[in-house]
């Protein structure tokens, strides 16, 4: 019997590493096994930085492979979540040693996703196959107009959950029987961080940049008034790292309510907690305001509005957003981030010859 063709995917997060096997069956992928390997804060805090975790996580990844790789099967490709790279176009990037070194030694920001390329590459070397990353958060396809911020010293730039956003747009294009590269829609990824983006003709042409003007999230501040922030920076009250932590990790819903769990907040609302209701409504308000903003980029000519990510498991949240924005476009809800499946689906398109891959280093030309 011919061995089953398997795509291995790995998605490192702050306190977990998600691994999965997908089998290619008749030009489609089928999930064979998936596992979320949890890492305690105590374990993670033992490492000096993210890069120092790579050997520890590799050992756990290899244990997953040894235990779960089906008999009579071949790993034919590996894919990892893309990290905090310099600006790149959307698409699939083949991992080489240069990309591994960049991810571990000189990433733009420290984040666990930087381990995606090194982990996929190390596994690929064992099985003598290619490794890839797909649509890292540094995908930047802004138009020249969208880069203008109002101050030449601080141009706008893209930082976006490109992997899940593009995967859900592929999904909607199939549902609508419309060419992916002709789609025009707003996509909102709603998880611990948010990305609300305008997508047109195959590209994310604008987004709210989760570190710039986005809605506040369960743990992030989003766009906040600049004058008080400037005053805080020069107050002597905070170090840079303390202020960054205050804005990204201990802000948003957590700062107001002491929890990052929307389910807990909704439970408090059911118990008639007015403060929880106000904060939740403010988050919905800001999400919908950004959806409207991105719809204006597309001249309000949309194939639909996609909401996706972990928060979209809440029916109330779906309904609350739909109530506010349905006049702009039809709302399509795709709960969860589905990042491992998105990785495998992208690699399948490469294998089938439907897409082409790039090889690191990858540069973009930013027009003035």
Image: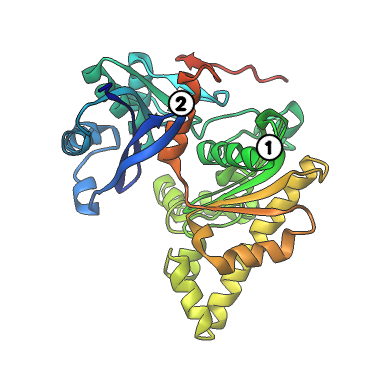
Q: Secondary structure at mark 2?
A: helix
Quadrant hosting residue 158: top right
Please name the residue that numbered disc 1 is placed on. Answer: 177
User: Callout 2 environment at 10 Å: few (<14), some (14 to 19), or many (20+)?
Assistant: many
User: Which image quarter holds the N terminus?
Assistant: top left
Q: On the rendered structure, is 293 left or right of 312?
A: right
Q: Nearer the viewer, mark 1 or mark 2?
A: 1
Distance from the alpha carbon under mark 1 to that under mark 2: 19 Å
Outermost residue, front side: 1
Q: Is residue 109 visible?
A: no
Q: Position of residue 244 (x, y in %)?
A: 45, 48
Quadrant hosting residue 366: top right
Could you tell me which residue is drawn at 63 percent across and 45 percent down?
A: 187
Along the polypeptide, which appears first: circle 1 or circle 2? 1
Nearest to the observer: residue 219 or residue 319: 319
Q: What mark, if any, has residue 348 been given in the picture?
A: 2
321 above or below 366? below
Could you tell me which residue is drawn at 53 percent across and 54 percent down?
A: 232
Could you tell me which residue is drawn at 38 percent across and 36 percent down?
A: 113
Nearest to the observer: residue 328 or residue 151: 328
């Amino acid at each position: 019997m011919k061995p089953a063709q398997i795509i291995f995917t790995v998605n490192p997060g702050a306190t977990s590493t998600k691994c999965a096997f997908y089998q290619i069956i008749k030009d489609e992928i089928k999930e064979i096994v998936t596992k979320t390997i949890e890492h305690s804060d105590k374990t993670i805090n033992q490492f000096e930085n993210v890069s120092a975790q790579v050997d520890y996580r590799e050992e756990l990844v290899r244990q997953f492979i040894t235990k779960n790789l089906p008999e009579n099967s071949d790993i034919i490709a590996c894919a990892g979540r893309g990290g905090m790279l310099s600006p790149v176009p959307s698409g699939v990037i083949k991992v080489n040693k240069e990309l591994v070194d960049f991810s571990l030694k000189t990433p733009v920001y420290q984040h666990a996703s930087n381990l995606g390329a090194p982990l996929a590459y190390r596994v690929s070397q064992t099985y003598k196959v290619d490794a890839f990353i797909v649509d890292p958060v540094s995908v930047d396809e802004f138009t020249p107009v969208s880069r203008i911020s109002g101050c030449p010293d601080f141009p706008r730039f893209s930082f976006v959950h490109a992997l899940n956003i593009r995967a859900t747009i592929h999904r909607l294009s199939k549902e609508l029987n419309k060419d992916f590269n002709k789609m025009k829609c707003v996509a909102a990824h709603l998880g611990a961080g948010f990305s609300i983006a305008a997508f047109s003709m195959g590209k994310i042409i604008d987004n709210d940049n989760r570190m710039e003007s986005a809605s506040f999230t369960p743990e992030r501040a989003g766009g906040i008034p600049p004058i008080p922030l400037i005053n805080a920076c020069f107050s002597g009250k905070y170090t840079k790292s303390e202020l960054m932590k205050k804005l990204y990790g201990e802000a948003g819903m957590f700062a107001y309510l002491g929890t990052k769990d929307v389910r807990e907040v909704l439970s408090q609302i059911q118990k008639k907690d007015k403060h929880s209701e106000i904060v939740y409504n403010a988050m919905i308000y800001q999400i919908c305001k950004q959806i409207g903003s991105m719809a204006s980029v597309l001249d309000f000519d949309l194939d639909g509005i996609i909401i996706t990510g972990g928060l979209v498991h809440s029916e109330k949240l779906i309904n609350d957003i739909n109530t506010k924005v349905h006049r702009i476009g039809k709302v399509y809800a795709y709960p969860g981030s589905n990042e491992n499946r998105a990785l495998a689906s992208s690699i399948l398109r490469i294998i089938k010859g439907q897409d082409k891959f790039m090889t690191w280093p990858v540069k973009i030309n930013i027009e003035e």
